[in-house]
């Protein structure tokens, strides 16, 4: 977990590192990569942002915009 509580009622930012493998041999099929997930909760609605680049500052900048959009559909939002 990279960060938490940065927007919405609750939020977390998670980094996932992965490696692709060949099904037939189980050997590495490349260098792999990094994915970032921001999970944002506003009341009882949750959204997930996904970025397939290691740019936590970018996804943290997008997260408040996603939270604001959730407020459109969430009654009594802040």
Image (tube, helix red, strand yellow):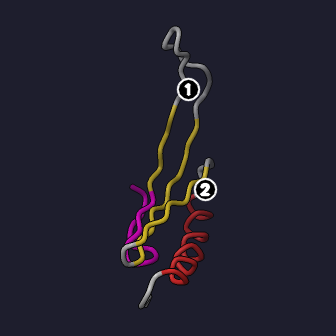
Indicate whether residue 3 is drawn in magenta.
yes
What kind of element bears circle 1? loop
Q: Is residue 16 above or below residue 29?
A: below
Name the image quarter holding the N terminus. Answer: bottom left
Label 1: few (<14), some (14–19) or many (≥20) C-alpha neighbours in 10 Å = few
Numbered range of the magenta stretch? 1-13
Q: Nearer the viewer, residue 4 or 78?
A: 78
Q: Is residue 25 above or below residue 9?
A: above
Which residue is pictured at 47% across the width and 50% down the height? 15
Which residue is pictured at 46% across the width and 76% down the height? 7
Front: mark 2 or 1: 1
Label 2: few (<14), some (14–19) or many (≥20) C-alpha neighbours in 10 Å = few
Name the image quarter holding the C terminus. Answer: bottom left
Q: Position of residue 6 (x, y in %)?
A: 44, 74
Indicate whether residue 35 is drawn in magenta.
no
The total of numbered circles placed on residues is 2
**Residue 22 appears left or right of 16:** right
Residue behind mark 2: 55
**Residue 2 appears left or right of 61:** left
Q: Nearer the viewer, residue 34 or 49?
A: 49
**Residue 57 appears left or right of 40:** right
Q: Earlier in the sequence, mark 2 or mark 1?
A: 1
Residue behind mark 1: 20
What kind of element bears circle 2? loop
**Residue 18 appears left or right of 4:** right
Mark linked to residue 45: none
Which residue is pictured at 60% across the width and 53% down the height? 51
Q: Position of residue 41 (x, y in %)?
A: 41, 71
């Amino acid at each position: 977990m990279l960060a938490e509580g940065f927007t919405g009622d609750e939020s977390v930012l998670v980094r996932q590192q992965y490696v692709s493998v060949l099904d037939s041999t189980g050997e590495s099929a490349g260098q792999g990569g990094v994915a970032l997930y921001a999970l944002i909760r506003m009341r009882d609605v949750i959204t997930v942002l996904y970025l397939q680049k290691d740019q936590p500052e970018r996804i943290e900048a997008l997260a408040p915009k996603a939270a604001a959009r959730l407020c459109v559909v969430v009654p009594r939002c802040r």
